[in-house]
Image (cartoon, grey):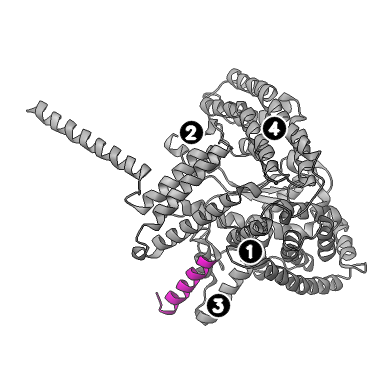
Amino acid sequence: MIAKTLKKIALGIATLLIAAAALAAHTWYAKPLSIDWLYLRHLVQQGLNNPEALTSLRALEPYGIRGHNAKLGEDTPAQDALDLAQLQVTYDALKSYDVAALKGQDKVSYEVFRYQLESDLEDHRFREQSYPVTQLFGAHSWLPQLMTDQQQVNDATDAEHYLARMQAFPKRMRQLAARVVAAEKKGTVAPRFALDKAISQIDALVAPSATSHPLVLGLREKLQKIPPEKMDATARDGLVARAAAAYASHVVPAYATLRASLDDQRARQTKNDGVWSLPDGAAFYASRIAHHTTTRMSADALHALGLSDVARIGAEMDALLIALALPGKTRAEKIKALELRPSEQYPDTDAGRAAVLTDYQTIIAQMEAGLAPQFKTLPRARIEVKRVPAYSEKASPLAYYTSPPLDGSAPGLFYANLGDIAQTSKFRIRTLAYHEGIPGHHMQLAIAQELQGLPIFRSIYGFTAYAEGWALYAERLAWEMGFQKKAEDNLGRLSDEMLRAVRLVVDTGIHAKRWTREQAISYMAVELGSDEAAAVTEIERYIVDPGQALAYKVGMLKILELREKAKIALGASFDPRAFHDVVLTNGSVPLTLLESLVADYIAVSKTGG
């Protein structure tokens, strides 16, 4: 009797396993029965194709899955074809579901997912117009930073994964070099300055000795945090020695291969033109505008908007400069006089740079303490301020932010570029802290990652106009909240807003109106009142990343427009905390969808819902 019962149980379990396997196979190879399974399948496919992204997100580690941390993704035409085929299959499946049946957050998820797929398909259409290597992009620079700053090493297995990635550098750099060669055959060559600076980055990356290289030092620092009972000193030293050997035998030769390709290409490249000079350049730029702004605004409309905003902000800046009684005739001379005040400068020393990081952290902490009147939902993740790695300081912006991992095991990172300490004036740092930290990128992105009850892609996907628009809006909101009371601090805020307005002019000027690099640099330096060196870094960023710089102002203006619409519609019942919840607790969304979400919030608020 017991044997017969066990046999029935075993048969039942086998039947369930077969059914589960069949369901899994159907979900993987055919249209999933549930749209949520389609979302998950797509993310799994993307993760399998991009192990570096999985390392950054740390979505699988809580489940004991970490083998991806030993691998590098493929960068080949075959992988491009696979990515495109998977995208198309997913998009076709998505369109076959009954959208009318979706309500509330299910409908929002569908719209975000659909928009992202369409954007990804459009990106593949212009894959050959994208520069494989520049001073901003390329595995040569982001891969070492991923490993030193985001890849965690908590035991011997993690260390082996780290070493395996170092040993995979040659293949990854050969693929990148092949991409450079193939792009040139299609008519896509990065500007001369971008090749020069990428080569300089490579030289800086291979200049240190094996024992002092960031990859080796990074592993040493990670191993030192492992408790002695889990790993003794001998084991640590052995792993570090293997990392030094891998650097010499794998990493250095890998970079030599890539450098040779860039050197060869640089010998023929003499131009620094916008993307209008690339095959199908006008259509490519229109695609970049749509991608980054999530609108259908034209280059001409954006250029005109920029000119108008530059004039408005310039008048406000000039009035403040007069009120501050600064010496000089031009905007540039007066701002330079302010920058040169001893009270606005940090010492060009290690102590001075440490003071900058401390001041940023203090400003963020002060803002955290004053958020209650404006926000209901706050992030749980911490934020830490770090210095931009020395090897990428020359080509990096003044600051940038990296989200915390999904498992909450590390803070969000606000990177400050301290290579040229003269670029960091005290009257400017508050605005930058609000933009990159709180209530800017950290608050927005950490809250998105901490959303509950939604498909995981809602915590991962990002739209430039939403993200950068919010961060620029956060700068203004901090001023409205009274955190930039000093005239000097407000000038810093206006200077940064002017930067975003100027971007509308120069980005469209470079890529649609065929401005030269020098013409754009001159315009920016005059309107911002900045020195040429700062303008060069900015303009060269826009040249290699067309359209991205447009998103800040477009997104900010849309959020301000929606806030004003809500204020007018709701009158005395308008609650900024409720408005900010609508903007932040739906994750990153296209601006058209954000407009719909705010309209729904207004309608519900009017009915007392």
**On the picture, is 91 further left or further right than 195?**
left
Characterize the magenta stretch by its predominant secondary structure. Answer: helix
Mark on residue 565?
A: 3
Disc 1 from disc 4: Cα separation: 34 Å
User: Which secondary structure lies at badge 3?
Assistant: helix
Q: Determine which residue is flagged by label 2.
A: 66
Question: x and y percent of residue 199 in the render?
Answer: 77, 37
Amino acid tagged 2: Arg
Q: Residue 568's image quarter?
A: bottom right
Work out whether mark 1 precedes mark 4 in sequence or the reverse, and give the earlier one.
Answer: 4
Up/down of 68 relative to 125, above or below: above
Q: Nearer the viewer, residue 123 or 382?
A: 123
Q: Determine which residue is flagged by label 1.
A: 474
- At a point 66% along the width and 24% down the height, the residue shown is 250
Q: Residue 268's image quarter?
A: top right
Q: Nearer the viewer, residue 62 or 556?
A: 556
Q: Is mark 2 in CB contact (under 8 Å) with mark 3?
A: no
Mark on residue 214?
A: 4
- Which region shows up in magenta? 592-609
- Mark nearest the camera among 1 and 2 is 2
Tag 1: Cα neighbours inside 10 Å, few (<14), some, or many (≥20)?
Answer: many
Q: From the image, which quarter does the N terminus lie in?
A: top left
- Mark nearest the camera among 1 and 3 is 3
Disc 3 from disc 4: Cα separation: 50 Å
Question: x and y percent of residue 307 in the render?
Answer: 75, 71
Tag 4: Cα neighbours inside 10 Å, few (<14), some, or many (≥20)?
Answer: many
Tag 2: Cα neighbours inside 10 Å, few (<14), some, or many (≥20)?
Answer: some
Question: x and y percent of residue 107 in the render?
Answer: 41, 62
- At a point 78% along the width and 35% down the height, the residue shown is 263
